[in-house]
Image: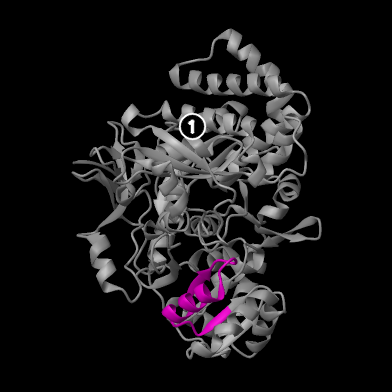
Amino acid sequence: MREFSVPAMVEVPDSATLTDAPFTRAADEPGRIVLRRKSGDAWSAVTAAEFAAETAGVAKGLVAAGVEPGDRVCLLSRTRYEWTVLDYAIWAAGAISVPIYETSSAEQIEWIVGDSGAKAVFAETDAHLAAVAEVRDRLPELAHVWGIDAGGVAEVTRLGADVGDDVVDERRRSRTAADIATLVYTSGTTGRPKGCEITHGNLVSTARNAVQGAIAEIAVEGSSTLLFLPLAHVFARLIEVATIEGGIVLGHSDVPNLLPDLASYRPTFLLAVPRVFEKVYNGAEQKAAADGKGKIFKAAAETAVAYSRALDDGRPGLGLKARHRVFDALVYRKLRAAVGGRVEYAVSGGAALGERLGHFFRGVGITILEGYGLTETTAPAAVNRPSALKIGTVGRPIPGVDVRIAEDGEVLVRGINIMRGYWNNEAATKEALDDGWFHTGDLGSLDDEGFLKITGRKKEILVTAAGKNVAPAPLEDRLRAHPLISQCLVVGDGRKFISALVTLDEEALGPWKAQHGKPEAMTVDELRRDPDLIAEVEAAVADANKSVSRAEAIKKHVILGVDFTEEAGHMTPSLKVKRNVVMKDFADEIDALYTG
């Protein structure tokens, strides 16, 4: 058993709540810019006083609508400015906010609204309102549904016109650090999503310790970020809170508008999941190949990786420095410009990034700080930081958090970030929490300096017929890094050998077809039978196999004619593969790998 602890840098009083920071800043620094809001193609500044006033206005409306302290209010929306206003307004009214992914089905919405016992829902679009209406008859506690696009925020604000400021102050002060601030439902790779009881203290303490400790070098005066991850996910939510707590300027975007928004907003740091970084790399590689500059990009990528590795080993040599300067002018500067030109750091979470990708981006001039956490740990449990960075790990525990590796290799976490429990699920709470330690279900190791490495999922360890234990995650992460591969699932539990299901990335196929003289009209189903594409995937599998022993290597694989998607039920909203669903839906393809 191994353990590493980092003491808290910031102690939070028992009376602390999430609404302290915005209202205190509004009183002390009313003109300070705290957010920027998209207005057409431009960004308009939102001061601390304006944000607090807007938040208080909505909170008064919620009070007038009958929302009581401790009531649940759901937010069904993409990431946008109004989400942050509504989140803080719900807290200012003393209520509990419950996020729902914008992509959720009516059945999923029904479960979260019903299980949480929500009194009200803010739904973004007409389609969202229709989905709520479809199940509303089965939700007797739901009293209000407001449409964000339909003017619902203004409508609620008007409701509270006669409610005094003193009422909001009283509601705010009725909460303590121990009270639940939000119920964040897990993505649910298996079974029904469980509502994690995240308290005011969890969010405030984790955010303050992250800003002043874990990412202190990033959260400096003048720093800003553009948030485009779903705010229904705990990672984005913690960042929302951290920006408000730390006075970091916050903007909102989404994936379809991301590139133009990055160019106009020009953030100083970003938050993303590994798939975003993979797509940036693969897109740049494909564009370079299409422009006849594939060899230049390959050399630039190799130089970036070598340069980053040399930073770890001591100092890059003169020759490497010279090559790096040349490629900075030819390639790296353009990549930095694509994300606004000012980004020096990016924080990555949600899945493993991969060493090569980490070294590539650091060599380009954007250091990716890989972290680790779960919904139950209020997002971060560990994170790399500029002054304590070890690529290939997820960093050291954040201040106020202890990490322990159990005898069976499971990662256990204890500290300021651990949820209170699962909503209405005492049995699951007792199973997950033991004497303050949260059982993550992940396998990992701690080195002598306290850096954590995640090696797989405890429940996803495959045991072959020969008794060999195989962690599928390292193989899957390596395969997903290939430009043509979207997703993969390594299988082989109880079988004679390890196999894999592979899906193709449709975005990457267009440029690949052009480069290889394939008809533009070729479908994914046709391409998966194409000898050239098969050879590329086989090479990717061979490369992935280099990272494991022969007994753990993929012996057979099949390229599927469809991708794993959230719509098909194969992926969670946070882009994790639902292993049991995929294995059920593609049982015939899996059997064919072992009977062919």
Numbered circles on residues, count: 1
Colour scheme of the picture: one colour
Secondary structure beneath disc 1? Answer: helix
Q: 16 or 587: which is nearer to us?
A: 587
| Residue at (32% x, 67% y) in the render | 420
Residue 481 covered by magenta stretch: no
* Image quadrant in which the N terminus is located: top left
Which quadrant holds residue 250? Answer: bottom right
Amino acid type, callout 1: Val
Residue extent of the magenta highlight: 96-121
Whether residue 385 appears in this view of the structure is no
Q: Can residue 470 be seen in this view?
A: yes
Comparing 123 with 189, the one in front is: 189
Let me know if residue 114 is in the magenta part: yes
How many residues crowd around disc 1 within 10 Å: few (fewer than 14), some, or many (20 or more)?
many
- Position of 266 with respect to 444 (left or right) is right
Within the image, what quadrant is residue 204 found in?
bottom left
Task: Estimate the x, y position of residue 229 in percent, counting from the top left.
Answer: 58, 55
The residue shown at (31%, 43%) is 495
Task: Compare residues 358 and 459 and report the one nearer the observer.
Answer: 459
Q: Where is residue 366 shown, x and y percent of the image?
A: 59, 34
Residue 129 in the image: state x and y as whole percent: 64, 79
Q: In this view, does 404 lie to the left or right of 332?
A: left
Q: Quadrant of the C terminus?
A: top left
**At which x and y percent is residue 14?**
34, 67
Which residue is most to the front? 596
Q: Say above or below: 550 vs 523.
A: above
Please tell me whether residue 211 is drawn above or below residue 296 in the rendered image. below
Residue at image point 37% right, 48% down: 9
Q: Residue at x 56, y 76 (%)?
A: 106
Residue that badge 1 annotates: 541
